[in-house]
Image (spheres, rainbow, N blue to C red):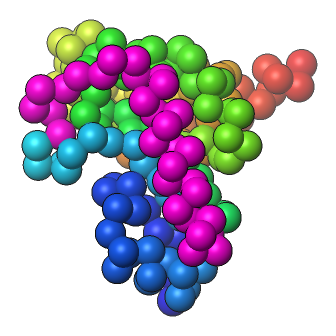
Amino acid sequence: YFSILNDVSGFSSAEMLEVARDYKPTCVLMHAQKTPKDMQENVFYHNLFDEMDRFFKEKLEVLEKYALQDVILDIGFGFAKLKEHNLALIKHLSHFLKFKKPLLVGASRKNTIGLITGREVQNRLAGTLSLHLMALQNGASILRAHDIDEHIDLIKVFKSLEEA
């Protein structure tokens, strides 16, 4: 038994949908073009937000047909997206609140941070915390992170500021 199903293919497989229907987990619906193997090849969007809106709307309708309504939306930071796309998604994350689903952001140690700072993967904590702080400010309710203690501190300080 499991309680969360995180499908990076965006629930494009009938088999995955059937497993989800049988177990009724919380489903993490991540946006990405292509597969993890080829997702960074020829990345192009006519309008990133319109295309993601369409993707989430269509996938949520499919999940609903399988009686799956406990869904978390993952913007797919770093998955088939350029640096500019990733930054726009964090800056305008509140755009996706209209779907009335929890928003998950996982920008921890991602390549976008390295492109901005020039830092190697193991030295991207400050960039990660910056992106995750803005994601929280803009509507994220779940963060996927590597550095747990630092993120706990981030959330404690963030909540204290909100309550001040």
Q: How many marks?
A: 0
Could you tell me what secondary structure mostly forms the magenta stretch?
A: helix
The quadrant of the rendering that contains the C terminus is: top right
Q: Indicate the position of residue 18 as horizontal and vertical percent values.
A: 45, 82
Q: Residue furthest right?
A: 164
137 over 15 or under it: above or below: above
Query: Can see residue 145?
Result: no
101 over 160 or under it: above or below: below
Q: Residue placed at 26% from the left, 11% from the top? A: 117
Q: Indicate the position of residue 156 as horizontal and vertical percent values.
A: 71, 35
58 or 21, which is in the foreground? 58
22 or 26, which is in the foreground? 22
> Residue 126 lies in magenta, yes or no?
no
> Residue 64 lies in magenta, yes or no?
yes
Report the span colored magenta.
39-68
Q: Residue placed at 60% from the left, 41% from the top? A: 103
